[in-house]
Image: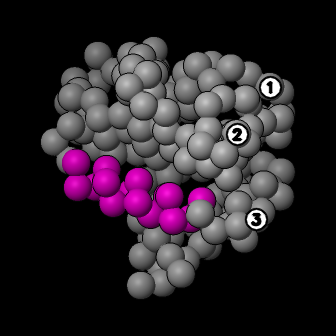
Amino acid sequence: MAGGLNTMLQEFLKIDSILVVGETRTFETLIKELCLAMLPALRAAEPEKLSGEALAKAVLHREQAASTAVGFGCAIPHAAVASLAGTAVGMALLKKPLAMATPDSEKVDIVFLMLGPVSDARTHLKLLSKIARVLHSQDAREKIRACKDPKQVWEVVSGLDED
């Protein structure tokens, strides 16, 4: 099903939700910055109640339950948030990887953040699965890590196949 992945990512990942981070930050700070970057792409049932801080709190609460680091220097933090009316994906490429608990002890430098409504678990699971497959590919990780700016990241991620 070549093309299914990039079509799905293009639907949920917007270039304004991609960060290329040059300095080392804490995981918590990174999540807050990604949530703020994703705000314009998110639809909420009650937009006035939507804030980067509230979204970050939901993601960090989920992260406390179980780490979303998947190995290979990658993490896919995610949260289902009742006030959201749609799903969005953000991404960060860290030029200085973060030390965090990972299955293979590698520092994390590629982070996909996914936020969606509690009512749409199907989309949430499909996106998690597709992103995990991309990150399992050494070739895909190398292409992403070679990027210098959000536009390059967007072009690389948009061009990836499921294969």
Q: Amino acid at mark 1?
A: Thr
In front: 162, or 136?
Answer: 136
In front: 54, or 111?
Answer: 111
Q: Nearer the viewer, mark 1 or mark 2?
A: 2
- The image's mark for residue 143 is 3
Q: Earlier in the sequence, mark 3 or mark 1?
A: 1
Using a 10 Å C-alpha cutoff, classify the residue at mark 3 as few (fewer than 14 neighbours), some (14 to 19) or many (20 or more): some
Q: Which residue is farthest left? A: 119
Q: Nearer the viewer, mark 2 or mark 3?
A: 2
Asked where in the image residue 28 lies, by quadrant, the reply is top right
- Secondary structure under tag 2 reads loop
Viewed as shown, does residue 45 lie left or right of 108? left
Q: Residue shown at 68%/20% (left/top)?
A: 26
Q: Residue shown at 53%/81% (left/top)?
A: 163
- The image's mark for residue 105 is 2
Viewed as shown, does residue 107 lie left or right of 75? right
Name the quarter where the N terminus is drawn: bottom left
Using a 10 Å C-alpha cutoff, classify the residue at mark 1 as few (fewer than 14 neighbours), some (14 to 19) or many (20 or more): some
The percent coordinates of residue 148 (x first, y second) are: 83, 51
Viewed as shown, does residue 79 lie left or right of 118? right
- Secondary structure under tag 1 reads loop
Q: Residue shown at 42%/38% (left/top)?
A: 78
Tell me where the magenta segment starts and ends, as one range. 121-135
Asked where in the image residue 147 lies, by quadrant, the reply is bottom right
Location of mark 1 (residue): 24
Using a 10 Å C-alpha cutoff, classify the residue at mark 2 as few (fewer than 14 neighbours), some (14 to 19) or many (20 or more): few
In front: 118, or 155?
Answer: 118
